[in-house]
Image (spheres, rainbow, N blue to C red):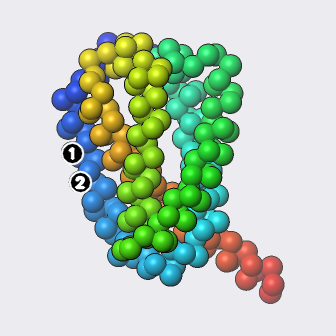
Amino acid sequence: MTLPDIEATSQLYWASTLVTAVIDLGFISLLGWRIQPQRFRQLKWALTAAALIFWTVLWTTMVWQCWGWCYRYVFPWWARWLIPPCYGLIYGAGGLGLWWLAVRLPGKPVVSFCLLGGLISVPGHLWAIYGAAMLEKVPLLQGLSPAPALVFGVFEFIFYWGVIIVIAMVLEGLWRLYLQWSTG
């Protein structure tokens, strides 16, 4: 896939961050209102499975759709086969860790889970920016400063972890239906 001759700017990322933050506020508030702490506690393994599935599918899509204009500048060619399952496993385990922390923190665990999920974007994005020099190597990102990239990543991941909660609810609902059906 080739992109038109465009450039991601800091101003574009700040504007995108504002839009994403507003979406997150509504989405996570709705999830926090609808999913009570006891219900969230029951989602432990469904959240782990949902995180594994979500991140594997996301990274498969990102690597295969964005390889030519983005990730080929950062990763060796053979990594496109390893990144999706590895990141799926890492973030699946991360989902379990987020769940563990979220049920132990005060307040609504759904909100804590998503906010913590946003924060776990920081190490990966720091590595991409400073370790892999992504902002210098990827032509599309050369007009972007580190700060808006890092801040946007937090709100981006908050949204992702909210989606993972929704997927977990669906998976858990399907599992309950299967159990009802199989036991007769």
Residue 26 x, y percent position in the rendering: 28, 62
Residue 78 seen anywhere in this rendered image of the structure? yes
- Say whether residue 151 is left or right of residue 174: left
> Dot 1 corresponds to which residue?
18
> Dot 2 corresponds to which residue?
22
- Say whether residue 125 is left or right of residue 152: right
Question: Badges 2 and 1: C-beta atoms under 8 Å apart?
Answer: yes
24 or 100, which is in the foreground? 100
Figure quadrant of residue 89: top right
- Say whether residue 70 is left or right of residue 179: left
Residue 104 x, y percent position in the rendering: 48, 71
The amino acid on which the numbered mark 2 sits, given as a three-letter code, is Val
SS assignment at label 2: helix
59 or 113, which is in the foreground? 113
* Circle count: 2
Residue 170 seen anywhere in this rendered image of the structure? no
Figure quadrant of residue 173: bottom right
The amino acid on which the numbered mark 1 sits, given as a three-letter code, is Leu
Q: Residue furthest bottom?
A: 184
